[in-house]
């Protein structure tokens, strides 16, 4: 482990166990942001997956660590705290997008440790075969669907002026994965139309990427998981004109009202992107709260329409003391 990481881990541990840490975090809430829980820790650790994926062992390690240091509560217990006061800081888990693996891999562990969670659905994907472009393109380029499919996609990428960089030929697995991460980030600047076309050029997976409504209802019925919207098409809301913004918000809200018993009054911005116009529209659609991706802890007086969260990667889940280091940085007055 690099020396810098060791120092951060040690400082994080010290912070949580110091009177300063206990004082700063008393009554505060930490909202964690996750996406996927894969079936395999090694697969999740590769750079192009690390940010959005955790493996089952790392996820379990994180849950055990959280239970030791925090009260693990439902999101609304942080946003609208009840009268029950605890000396311990509160933490809540949120998952973005609505990945099928949330039901298949994450839920059993949430249940085992009785840790509540909120899942934010990009509602067009739920119960459909529609695919998230970064997953389909990323995994096809990673050869997860065979060499032929990879070559076909590379040809399509050439056509939209995005040839594969030389770094993809690196023999080292880690460096190749890092090159893929950078390449995928660059693709974000392509038009939604081009991204859809590229996604269509990728082979279909055997199972849908997203949850279906049956799974959503089963998770909700457990009493441990609640759901909210994360856009309908996962379009970046700040880039939409007024009419399309209205459509995204109405469609996603309606889908949650139809598909769930008790949807959360909390919106979750795709990519975290929001501005004054988006926040105003979200509030007008009966959402008093919305989650962004800015970092920080919640004390009850932040902008309720741009709530901060801490992202959890495979690396952080394996070393949760790194999380306490970041909470420490975020908690500084
Ligand atoms: Zn998302």
Image (cartoon, rainbow, N blue to C red):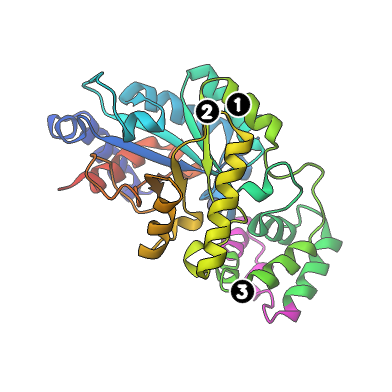
User: Which region of the structure is painted magenta?
Assistant: 158-181
> At 64% from the left edge and 59% from the top edge, which residue is drawn?
134
Q: Residue 225: which numbered mark, if any?
A: 2
Q: Nearer the viewer, mark 2 or mark 3?
A: 2
Q: Residue 315: which numbered mark, if any?
A: none
The x and y percentages for residue 196 are 71, 65
When the figure is inspected, residue 136 is found, relative to residue 58, above or below; the finding is below
> At 71% from the left edge and 79% from the top edge, which residue is drawn?
160
Label 2: state its secondary structure.
strand
Check if mark 1's residue and mark 2's residue have beta carbons within 8 Å. Answer: yes
Is residue 207 visible to the viewer in this orientation of the structure? yes
Asked whether 325 or 187 is in front, the reply is 187
Q: How far apart are the alpha carbons under marks 1 and 2?
A: 6 Å
Q: Is the residue at mark 3 in contact range of ligand 1, meaning its CB lies under 8 Å from it?
A: no
Q: Is residue 167 magenta?
A: yes
Q: Which residue is mark 3?
A: 190
Left or right of 270, for residue 75: left
Q: Is residue 273 magenta?
A: no
Check if mark 2's residue and mark 3's residue have beta carbons within 8 Å. Answer: no
The x and y percentages for residue 31 are 37, 39
Q: Which residue is mark 1?
A: 219
Q: How far apart are the alpha carbons under marks 1 and 3?
A: 35 Å
When the figure is inspected, residue 159 is found, relative to residue 9, above or below; the finding is below
Left or right of 168, for residue 35: left
Q: Quadrant of the N terminus?
A: top left
């Amino acid at each position: 482990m690099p020396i810098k990481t060791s120092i951060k881990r040690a400082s994080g541990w010290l912070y949580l166990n110091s009177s300063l840490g206990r004082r700063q975090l008393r009554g505060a809430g930490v909202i964690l942001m996750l996406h996927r829980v894969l079936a395999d820790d090694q697969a999740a650790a590769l750079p192009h997956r690390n940010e959005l994926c955790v493996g089952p062992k790392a996820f379990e390690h994180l849950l055990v660590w959280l239970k030791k240091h925090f009260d693990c509560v439902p999101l609304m217990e942080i946003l609208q705290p009840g009268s029950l006061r605890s000396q311990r800081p509160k933490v809540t888990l949120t998952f973005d997008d609505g990945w099928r693996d949330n039901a298949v891999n994450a839920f059993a562990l949430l249940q085992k440790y009785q840790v509540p969670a909120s899942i934010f659905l990009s509602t067009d994907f739920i119960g459909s075969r529609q695919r998230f472009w970064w997953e389909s393109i990323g995994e096809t380029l990673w050869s997860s669907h065979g060499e032929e499919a990879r070559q076909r996609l590379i040809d399509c990428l050439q056509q939209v002026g995005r040839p594969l960089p030389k770094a993809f030929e690196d023999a080292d697995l880690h460096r190749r994965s890092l090159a893929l991460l950078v390449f995928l980030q660059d693709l974000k600047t392509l038009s939604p139309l081009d991204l859809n076309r590229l996604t269509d050029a990728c082979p279909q997976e055997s199972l849908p990427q997203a949850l279906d409504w049956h799974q959503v209802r089963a998770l909700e019925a457990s009493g441990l998981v609640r759901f909210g919207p994360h856009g309908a098409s996962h379009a970046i809301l700040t880039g939409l004109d007024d009419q399309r913004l209205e459509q995204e918000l109405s469609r996603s809200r309606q889908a949650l009202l139809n598909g769930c018993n008790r949807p959360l009054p909390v919106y979750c911005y795709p990519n975290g992107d929001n501005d004054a116009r988006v926040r105003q529209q979200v509030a007008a659609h009966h959402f008093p709260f919305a989650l962004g991706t800015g970092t920080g802890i919640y004390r009850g007086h932040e902008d309720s329409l741009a709530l901060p969260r801490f992202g959890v990667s495979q690396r952080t889940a394996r070393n949760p003391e790194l999380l306490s280091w970041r909470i420490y940085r975020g908690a500084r007055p």
